[in-house]
Image (spheres, rainbow, N blue to C red):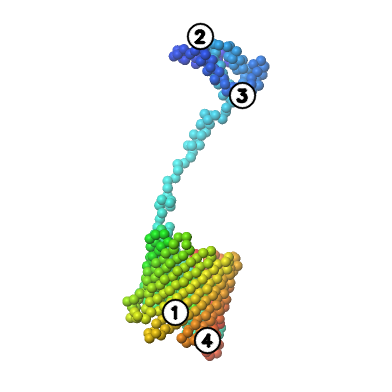
Amino acid sequence: MRRSIVLLCALALAAPAMAQEEVPAEGLEEGAATAAAPAVESPEVDANATEPTDDSSSPETDSITTSAEASGPVVSAEPEAGVEAGVEAAATIEPERPDEPAAAEPVTQAVDDEVPPAPEPTESSDGDHEWSDDLAIHGFADAYVQATWTLPEPFSGDQSGVLGHRPFTHIGGLTVSFVGLDMEYESDDVGATINLRFGTSTPRLLGATSGLPDGMQFLKQAYASWRPFEGAQIDFGQFDTIYGAEVSESWQNHNYSRGALYNLVQPFYHTGFRVAYAPPDTGLTFTGLAVNGWNNVLDDNDMKTFGLQVGYENSGVAVSAGYLGGPEGAGNEDLWRHFADVLVTVEVGDLELAANADYVAEELGGGMFDQLWGVMVSARLRFAPYVALGLRGEYIGDPDTDTGLATGTFTIEVTPMEHLIIRLDSRVDLSTDDTFQDPSGAPSPTAVSSILGMVVRTN
């Protein structure tokens, strides 16, 4: 029965071809051989065997294929033999290729139908950069409790009359030194910085409240920045000084309390222009100033103060040298104040070292000068992850009066969590004069203090 069905199918396929064009017997024979060629790669079939050697073949199929091969040349009147052989060869090959793409098409199409379309770009993509992405806002609170053991009343409140050389730790007892809010905007070419400060140390940093214009009493920094080309930046407004090793933010120094060199010899801030250029791949930085003077929001004369600093940094070593000069004082345009600053910092693993030297000379007229100089050396050693030790020694000398002041500070720092810093300063101040008091209230050259400071910050 199967042989009959196959013969009928072959005749049905051959009839249209014969009606359109007469195919030579040689062409049919070649076509049959070509169609049967893949069968050579499958296991060889024995025509005389009673059972197929391959599961994909049946006895009938083997017989038909053998007859087609043994028939020899075929004439044009009987083309069905070659066609039948080709059809049977295709039928024989079909079961041996279950993984053909044709069989897999329905599955592939079903998977494609289930794939969701690609999401459209959102506003947070690189093509839609928001200005708020360049804005950073941080805050901090800095409080301390101090006891000056050599005073009659160690926790007696404002001790500025005795500890006037200390800029931000002049209060006995507990006080909030600073509460700060810092906002910074930085894009590729422009930027803006605003720092606000509140607390008992703010008048010591920014000047007496009554001496500042309305709205400036709590403004530590407020300036705009422009970067015209690579390595260059121009700042205009009120900004921190570029000189010295220490800053007003306690956690950025090696000790909690700031030194006498920072307070007595160096400026805190300036108002005017600051221009900096760092040639790429050199480690050098050149900075110039044209400002109102020292710690001035408004100038009190028609002349400006000018400054220059050259810095170099490489492999954990940084060196800078700077000068600042200009007339200071109301209506004074001829008598200049000259200031020189040298700073060297070194970082070796968890050890940080700093050495700072300053000299200031203010003209008094007639070839007379009011002079002051000082040196400071400090170190900080970190024991990861929670503990660090700080040590500072300094000396301030007045050549005009042959007097001097030496200070020594040892600091234990603990950082129990990322945003909390606790520091304990043990500090000794020694003066060549009887500047301080002893517990009885008598003049004394020595002041001994303990200061416990705590800072909570967001960054």
| Image quadrant in which you'd find residue 237 | bottom left
Question: Which residue is under mark 3?
Answer: 42
The answer to whether residue 76 is seen in the rendering is yes
If you read the primary sequence from the N terminus, does the residue marked by circle 4 or circle 3 appear first?
3
Q: Specify the amino acid type for callout 4.
A: Thr
Between the residue at mark 3 and the residue at mark 2, the CA separation in whole angstroms equals: 32 Å
Residue 16: image location, x then y, percent: 46, 14
Between the residue at mark 4 and the residue at mark 3, the CA separation in whole angstroms equals: 110 Å
If you read the primary sequence from the N terminus, does the residue marked by circle 3 or circle 1 appear first?
3
Residue 66: image location, x then y, percent: 61, 15
Question: Which residue is under mark 1?
Answer: 360
Residue 193: image location, x then y, percent: 41, 66
| Quadrant that contains the N terminus | top right
Q: Specify the amino acid type for callout 3.
A: Ser
Q: Secondary structure at mark 4?
A: loop
The answer to whether residue 297 is seen in the rendering is no
Question: Which residue is under mark 4?
Answer: 432
Which residue occupies 49% across, 72% down? Answer: 343
Question: Which residue is under mark 2?
Answer: 77
